[in-house]
Image (tube, rainbow, N blue to C red):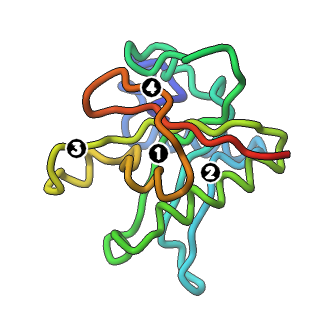
Amino acid sequence: MWWRLNRSVWSKGRGEGNRRAFRKVVERGDPPGLLAYSGPDAVGWMAIAPREDYPGLGRSRILKPLDDKPVWSVTCFFVARGFRRQGVTVALLKAAAKYARGRGARMLEGYPSEPESSTIADAWVFTGLAGAFRRAGFREAARPSAKRPIMRRAVRA
């Protein structure tokens, strides 16, 4: 909900309030993301939606729109601890291209971290890592800050 709500609403809703707000997004019927499975178990999740569903991106001083092209945004990941560094994020990103294309998208955009070392805490890479985006066919479209590229991938109709 970080990207979907203004900061004061998000802060007031910390915990259960934001969980209820997210439940409402799910109940509207338009999936807010994709799940990755290992057998019957969900091991990863990725948020994906048209950029306009994430007003927080427009308020960010470094993640403002690059142009007027309509894009779908990949904003957040979770991968279960035992499945990290095994390609789950890359698989989710590849699935995102297929999912978005099926809903009429032409361009995917993500906002991963590109840390200076590999010892960054998991909590700071919830937007993904640039290397995973590259492996999934994304290219750097802009670099508004040293550690935060904006990456894009065209999806074919």
Instruction: Give the Cα separation between the discs numbered 3 and 1.
Output: 16 Å
Whichever of labels 2 and 1 marks the residue nearer the N terminus, that label is 2
Label 4 vs label 2, nearer the camera: 4
Image vertical order of residue 1 relative to residue 143, above or below? below
Label 3 vs label 2, nearer the camera: 3
Mark 4 — residue? 142
Kind of residue at disc 2: Gly
Question: Nearest the camera: 80 or 24?
Answer: 80
Kind of residue at disc 4: Ala
Secondary element type, mark 4: strand
Query: How many other residues sit within 10 Å of disc 1, few (<14), some (14-19) or many (≥20)?
Result: many
Whichever of labels 4 and 3 marks the residue nearer the N terminus, that label is 3
Q: Residue at x 37, y 35 (%)?
A: 14
Whichever of labels 4 and 2 marks the residue nearer the N terminus, that label is 2
Instruction: Give residue 115's mark.
Output: 3
Kind of residue at disc 1: Cys
Mark 2 — residue? 33
Q: Residue at x 48, y 58 (%)?
A: 135
Instruction: Tell me whether circle 2 and circle 1 mark residues in contact (CB < 8 Å).
Output: yes
Image vertical order of residue 113 relative to residue 63, above or below? below
Whichever of labels 4 and 1 marks the residue nearer the N terminus, that label is 1
Q: Residue at x 77, y 38 (%)?
A: 105
Residue 156 rendering spot, x and y as whole percentages:
79, 46
